[in-house]
């Protein structure tokens, strides 16, 4: 009887912890998205308004996050093995998304690549990273920071492949050189140069400026995402949206657990914030790509919305298991 009472108490405590994480860490971030969705639905903000906000994020705020992450992270505290294992799980989902949509849905190369990117590329910058800052000590946010930096490379390579496919006559050299104007890649390189400079830490004004701008990215991005997804969406791509959502929200977490915990030997506590990224919603950048390259925007938009709702429920579970 005492053992049963102890189990019941532990179960109630775990449930309360999940609820507390949901209310205190996840909802404050998710509600910004909900506000954007509401005002977009009511017509208070339009799609061009959202596009302008995303332009600020893509060219200013997201690069500032990248710089801020690199210059404020202690290199000695990084765990490249954990980041590498996450990268393996991400690339497996990327490949699965590409091959499933290429050969099952008979999509062209470009659309299949965009679907693979959407299925694997998490909304860590705007969603998971702020949540981990609310819910955990600073050391536990470092794995998420590592993933954000790595994904800049995945993002860049995807753009290069899409540019080569879109204009094959221009050649790969032009596609690669075009990335010299990529704000995220430039921010990554600038951050590394600042860290490696022989004159010590960068000026405090530089650090504070990058941090101040970076703080604007998540609320602005989530608000604009809500506006963007409030528009009417065609149901013609329903099955494709289900596949993208399923790969991101169920296949990726399972693969992440198998690769990181089972094969990699990491304890769940050490890998907790990394596993949270595996249940993050589809990144909004996937919709930006789809729009830019004339891809399956409706399917990706639906998967972003559905995966966001699922993520709000799943992240608190991963945070306390």
Image: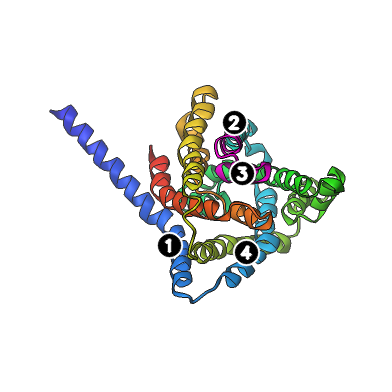
State which mark lies toward you, 4 or 2.
4
- Between the C-alphas of marks 4 and 2, the distance is 30 Å
Where on the picture, by quarter, is residue 25? bottom left
Contact between marks 3 and 2 (CB within 8 A): the answer is no
Residue 137 at x, y = what percent? 50, 47
Q: Earlier in the sequence, mark 3 or mark 2?
A: 2
Q: Which region is colored magenta?
A: 96-120
- Say whether residue 145 is magenta: no
Point 69% across, 48% down: residue: 70
Under circle 1, the secondary element is helix
The residue where tag 2 is placed is 85
The residue where tag 4 is placed is 54
Under circle 2, the secondary element is helix
Judge by depth and name the residue closer to the eye, 128 or 134.
Answer: 128
Residue 130 at x, y = what percent? 52, 54
Q: Earlier in the sequence, mark 3 or mark 4?
A: 4
- Between the C-alphas of marks 3 and 2, the distance is 18 Å
* Most frequent secondary structure within the magenta stretch: helix
The residue where tag 1 is placed is 31
- The tag on residue 117 is 3
């Amino acid at each position: 009887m005492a053992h049963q009472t102890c189990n019941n108490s532990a179960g109630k405590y775990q449930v309360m912890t999940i609820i507390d994480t949901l209310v205190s860490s996840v909802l404050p971030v998710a509600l910004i998205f909900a506000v954007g969705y509401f005002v977009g639905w009511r017509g208070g903000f339009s799609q061009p308004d959202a596009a302008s906000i995303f332009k600020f994020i893509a060219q200013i705020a997201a690069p500032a996050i990248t710089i801020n992450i690199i210059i404020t992270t202690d290199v000695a505290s990084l765990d490249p093995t954990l980041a590498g294992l996450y990268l393996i799980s991400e690339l497996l989902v990327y490949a699965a998304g590409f091959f499933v949509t290429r050969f099952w849905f008979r999509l062209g190369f470009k659309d299949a690549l965009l679907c693979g990117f959407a299925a694997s590329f998490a909304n860590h910058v705007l969603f998971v990273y702020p949540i981990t800052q609310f819910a955990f000590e600073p050391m536990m946010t470092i794995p998420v920071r590592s993933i954000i930096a790595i994904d800049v490379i995945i993002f860049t390579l995807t753009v290069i492949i899409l540019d080569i496919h879109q204009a094959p006559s221009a050649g790969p050299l032009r596609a690669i050189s075009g990335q010299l104007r990529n704000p995220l890649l430039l921010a990554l390189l600038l951050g590394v140069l600042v860290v490696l400079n022989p004159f010590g830490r960068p000026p405090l004004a530089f650090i504070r400026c990058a941090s101040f701008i970076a703080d604007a990215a998540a609320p602005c991005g989530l608000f604009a995402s809500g506006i963007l997804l409030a528009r009417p969406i065609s149901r013609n791509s329903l099955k494709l949206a289900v596949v993208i959502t399923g790969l991101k929200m169920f296949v990726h977490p399972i693969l992440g657990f198998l690769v990181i915990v089972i094969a990699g030997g990491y304890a769940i506590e050490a890998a907790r914030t990394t596993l949270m990224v595996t249940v993050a919603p589809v990144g909004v950048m996937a919709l930006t790509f789809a729009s830019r390259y004339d891809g399956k925007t409706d399917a990706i938009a639906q998967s972003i919305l559905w995966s966001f709702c699922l993520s709000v429920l799943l992240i608190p579970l991963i945070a306390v298991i």
